[in-house]
Image: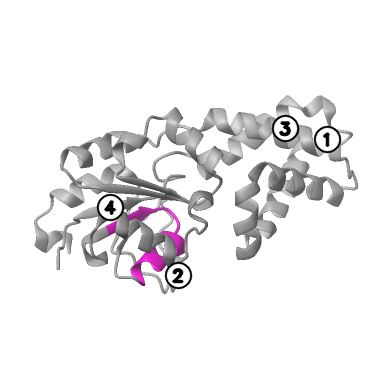
Amino acid sequence: MALLPGGMLWDLDDTILTFDAVADISWDQTLHQISSELPNIDSRVLKNAIKDTARVFWSDPDRHRTGRLHLDRTRQNIVLAALSSLHVPDGNLAATIAATYGRIRDEQIRPVPGAVETLRILQKQNIPLVLVTNGESKTQREKIRRFHLEPFFTAICIEEECGVGKPDREIYERALAALGLPPEDVWMIGDNLIWEVAAPQKLGIRGIWVDYQRRGLPEGSPVIPYKIVGTATEIVPLISLPHSQAQ
């Protein structure tokens, strides 16, 4: 059994590119920009209502699966539900807020510092990489093109294109097939403890958890990653370790 990877699977959002990490500042900028259109609603109150509504929506796995495949529409519905909870059920305002937020958030997305350089190093080490990401094809492909990520990957598995996404085992089986490697020779790198550590580890893949918020494992967590890193850059020292230290 190989202790260092024959190949790697990589998540995209909040592993290679910022995404959830820029949500809060994007809402602040959005509500500041459209503050003159808010009908006697304190922007902080609205922001909290949106975040609370979003938290409830995304906590359900089935809603999460359908919602992320229609992200613009989902975001508008969440904003409308938040406005309605504040007794302002204004669909036009919800559409304006959602569209403004989408534009601002897209502008905020950047590569995680050092992530692209890490991919470049791995490529030079001849470690084959496969990108495994949930969401809409159009949205994810735009980000991949924008930041010139495609050349780093042997294959790209996007949920909408594959018809299945994380944490379903089939998406990992497809990624393994693209690598042509057994699961015990493969690492999965991602920030979602369930999707990108627990799920692939059921197949024998080694899950590397990117704890970008540096919160540590939840108390009593049944999921134990093979390794925990704070950023993608910490992957490079792992592949440079002697086998006895990398285990």
Tag 2 or tag 4, which sits nearer the N-term? 4
Q: Is residue 190 visible?
A: yes
Q: Is residue 57 left or right of residue 229?
A: right
- At label 4, counting other C-alpha atoms closer than 10 Å, the crowd grade (few under 14, some 14-19, many 20 or more) is many
Disc 2: which residue: 219
Alpha carbons under labels 1 and 3: distance apart = 11 Å
**Amino acid residing under circle 4:** Met
Where does residue 59 sit, x and y in percent of width and height?
63, 62
Quadrant occupied by the C terminus: bottom left
In the rendered image of this protein, does residue 198 appear above or below residue 32?
below
**Amino acid residing under circle 1:** Leu
Circle number at residue 93? 1
Q: Residue at x 64, y 56 (%)?
A: 66
**Amino acid residing under circle 2:** Glu
Q: Is residue 6 left or right of residue 191?
A: left
Q: Which residues are magenta?
A: 187-202
**Amino acid residing under circle 3:** Leu
Tag 3 or tag 1, which sits nearer the N-term? 3
Where does residue 213 sit, x and y in percent of width and height?
44, 49
Q: Residue at x 45, y 32 (%)?
A: 110
Where does residue 99 sit, x and y in percent of width and height?
71, 33
Q: Is residue 54 left or right of residue 205?
A: right
- In front of the other: label 1 or label 2? 1
